[in-house]
Image: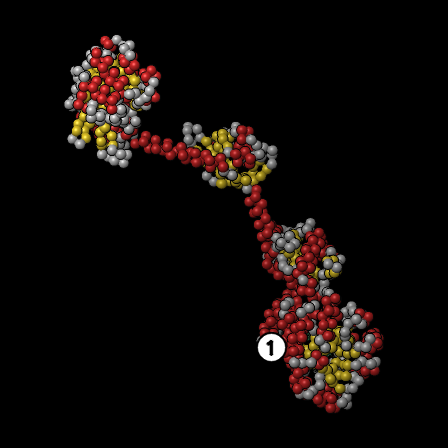
Amino acid sequence: MRRRRVPWPLVALASLLIAWIGSRTDIVTRLEQGMGDAGASMLQHEIDSDVVIVAIDAKSIAELREWPWPRRHHAALIEKLAEAPPQQLFIDIDFSAASNPLDDQRLATAMAAWDGEPIILPAFFQYASASSTALVVTEPLDILRPHVAVASVNLEPDADGLVRSVRRTWSVAGRTLPAVAAALGDLAAENDAEIIIDYTISPSSFRVLSYIDIVANRTPAEYFADKTVFVGATAIELGDMVPVPVYQSLPGVIVQALAYESARTGNLRFLDERLYWLIASLFGLILGYWFCRQTWQRNVLVIAASMAAMSGFALYLYATFDLIIKIVPLAITVTTAYLLATLRSLESETVRAMMYAVGFRKREALLNSIVLSSTDCIVCIDADGSIRTANPAAASLFGCELDELVGASIFDFVPELTTRDDESQSQVFDRAADSILESNARTMGGDNFPVELSVSRVQLTEELLYTAIIRDISERKAQQQQLQFQATHDPLTSLPNRAAMAAHLDACLAQHRSDSPVALLMIDLDRFKEVNDTLGHNVGDYVLHEVARRLADVASSRGFLARIGGDEFALVIDQLHDSNVIAELSRDLADCLKKPIKTSGIAIEVGLSIGIARYPEDAKDAETLFKYSDIAMYSAKRNGAEFEFYDSSNDRHSVRKLTIATRLRQAITNSELELHYQPQVNLKTGRVDSVEALLRWEDAVLGAVNPAEFVELAEATDLIRPLSNWTLVRAFEQAVAWQDEELELRVAVNISARMLQDVGFPELIANLLLDIGVSPKQIELEITESAMMVDPQRALQVIEALSELGFLISVDDYGTGYSSLAYLRDLPVHALKVDKSFVLNLHRHAGNRVIVESTVQMAHALNLMVVAEGVETAADAEILRACGYDFGQGYLYSAALKPDALSEWIEAFNSEGSADQSLNLAQG
Ligand code: C2E
Ligand code: CA
Ligand code: CA
């Protein structure tokens, strides 16, 4: 699309307007003056002049020896000149102030005697004071004035300080004086307000005579007779120097003489303004028209030619017709017309392109600085893969100098960008273009590192190039790997976690589908909870760490080991194996924990239980495998076995366990449990003065649940705390109730092994004592030997604290654990309860009888009471009584009863004495 063009006359008019406006400005005026001055100095010439300068020069001052001169000298000069009178005489000396009257009078006389054209003396227009705008005129003395003519010597400089013209007349308060130049030529009435001083006239056109030479009669009269004589100071020291163009400065009198000559020749003038602008308009129109028709290149020639012509013509007019033509406005017209015409000739695309080029420069600079300072590596490659340019980041990325990089092949640094069959290099780049690739790169030294690469095509010229931005992503990769590791590993042991294990198992099953078998070993630590509770988490963590290390030593090479819970580990074996191999491995795993783990001076023993489930025979999916191995593990734990293979009959058990755990929690919160009390008969007195509290739980779904079963389950979970608390509260309250009924009964309460490991337990129980208001003397705490197994030190500490609170303490199930009597000696224990397994059918087991008898002797030696539990027959009771047992407890007397039933029973039993104990046998 072609742009609508501006009509050419508009171009011409616009340029004229601009030139006209320009000509009004100070800068153009000065330019113009400068050019005029230059022209004048070029045209400088001597003229045939009748001007004679009588110079008050250095020589005259030197000869007359005094200054200011007495005015009689001037009188003498006038008289001398009068002998051969000049045609006109201007004395440029200030006579406005009186000197000595004699001299002034002599001067006046000399002037009065002057014949011919009157002598011209200077007057000076000036401001009355520095702050005033009113003009005053300084004139010669009154005694001189009648004999002379007065003319203004004012010289007004232009804006640049140079004097170029004089005003033809000066007026103040109705008085009008001509300028000297006008007065001498009698030209005051001319039209022009100004006399333009023609500096092309050389001052050497004037004959200069020394003042003293005339006075001393050394100058021939013909030199000044009939001439126009200017008398004035030329000696520099007199200070009457005027700044002028061409000559820098001239004495005032010379400037006056030049002005006079300019006025006399009378035709140096500016071209009439209107005529000038008419010509300029014509000029502008012609050139505007011309420029608009021609190409800009040709117009350059025209512009140069017209400028030259204009200058030449102006000089010619000046020299020949004393006509001054302003050049600058014309020059402005021409150049503006040229520029506008050129702009006008540009296609819109070109204009846009020019604008763009201007913007592009900036953008290019910006881009350059971005590229240079970028921390990403930026390289430009050609279609063959050789590097054309690269930024500093690229050099440092590839470990070389920038100039080594240029010319090298990108494939040397990013080898993975290789071509496929039948593919050219540029096709590789095209394939990579406009997407972000991850690849491996290589430094010049051969180090590999991962990079992210984005390639894009650039087609600036005919040649197709590519830029590649390459970013080192080693750090990011490492971070990703670390995150990946964190997501799939346990931070404590650095083993894979449950999620990783599940993923691995899924992968194995997918791979092995009906192929070779997979086994899952669920490994659970025994007694770890106690370690954690009693020794703190730091020790617990250390133990786990060590266990993990040992397990990994054994199993890592044979399968995938993971930590899937607090003290649970799992091992997936997907290599060839039969039961024997797995059993062997399980034993190895158990064995590796046999050696105690030592930390901060303690040797800790933890065991493990392993449950094994197999694919495909046990389960067909991962979830079931998990479940079954868990069941097998639980069964192993219960049976005290190191490992067990899954057996479908275990299943029922585990379901029941889960049910018990959930329902027990409810039963505790809803207080659905009960405490029953079993009497302990004092075998010495035949009376009952103590009972044992035993838990009873009749669940709506499960029916009556054996306390041994649910207590063990509670101990394996956190339920043991609320359960223990509930039991203690209930037993204490019952003791208080009986006391209120004035029934003197000691209540024995079973204390879980877990509670004995808890250093907070004594405080808890002490608070209960206070709250319920029971006396500790009324309470007996039954503890088992196994309670001391994990940490005897701590258990001892707790037992001592309990004893200090005033409780009686007895050791339950004596004979089933490891403790020896010697060991018990150090404990604040009051009684032993020999386990019922020794007591049941005592009369039929000679071996048990030996144990029972020796135990009572040793216990008594240690001042311990001895209790036999499980007394079912009168025969057994008799044996026990005979060998010195203090108490008997068993179905022979009574099973555990509800509190009310018990108090009735005791009342009856005690009142009957030991008359017929067997009558009260209750069936358990
Ligand atoms: P244990 O402390 O040894 O309690 C004695 C057990 O022997 C009781 O079983 C009792 O009923 C039973 N028994 C009493 N006389 C005879 C007898 O002549 N022949 C036979 N065969 N057994 C007799 P129970 O009540 O089933 O308790 C079992 C275990 O449950 C208790 O053994 C004890 O370890 C635990 N347990 C019961 N109640 C509590 C409790 O309140 N707290 C704690 N921590 N454990 C309790
Ligand atoms: Ca007991
Ligand atoms: Ca017992």
Q: Is residue 630 above or below residue 343?
A: below
855 on left or right of 921: right
In the image, residue 472 above or below residue 920: above
Residue nearer the viewer, 826 or 95: 95
Q: Quadrant of the N terminus?
A: top left
Task: Quickly name the residue at label 1.
Answer: 672
The percent coordinates of residue 635 (x first, y second) are 68, 64
- Quadrant for ligand 1 reads bottom right
User: Which of the two residues, 341 or 522, is positioned nearer the viewer here?
Assistant: 341
Q: Which residue extends farthest front?
A: 102
Please give left or right for residue 269 compared with residue 770 in the image: left
Q: Position of residue 23 (x, y in %)?
A: 25, 28
Query: Looking at the image, what colour scheme do you see?
Result: secondary structure
Residue 460 in view, yes or no: yes
Where 254 sits versus 340, above or below? above
Amino acid type at circle 1 is: Glu
In the image, 692: left or right of 224?
A: right
- Tell which of 897 and 804 is nearer to you: 804
Q: Locate residue 757: give its quadrant.
A: bottom right
Residue 292 can be seen in this image: no
Q: Position of residue 579 (x, y in %)?
A: 70, 56
- Classify residue 148 by image quadrant: top left
Left or right: residue 606 compared with residue 248: right
Q: Residue at x 71, y 85 (%)?
A: 744
* Rendered residue at 41%/35% (across/down): 363
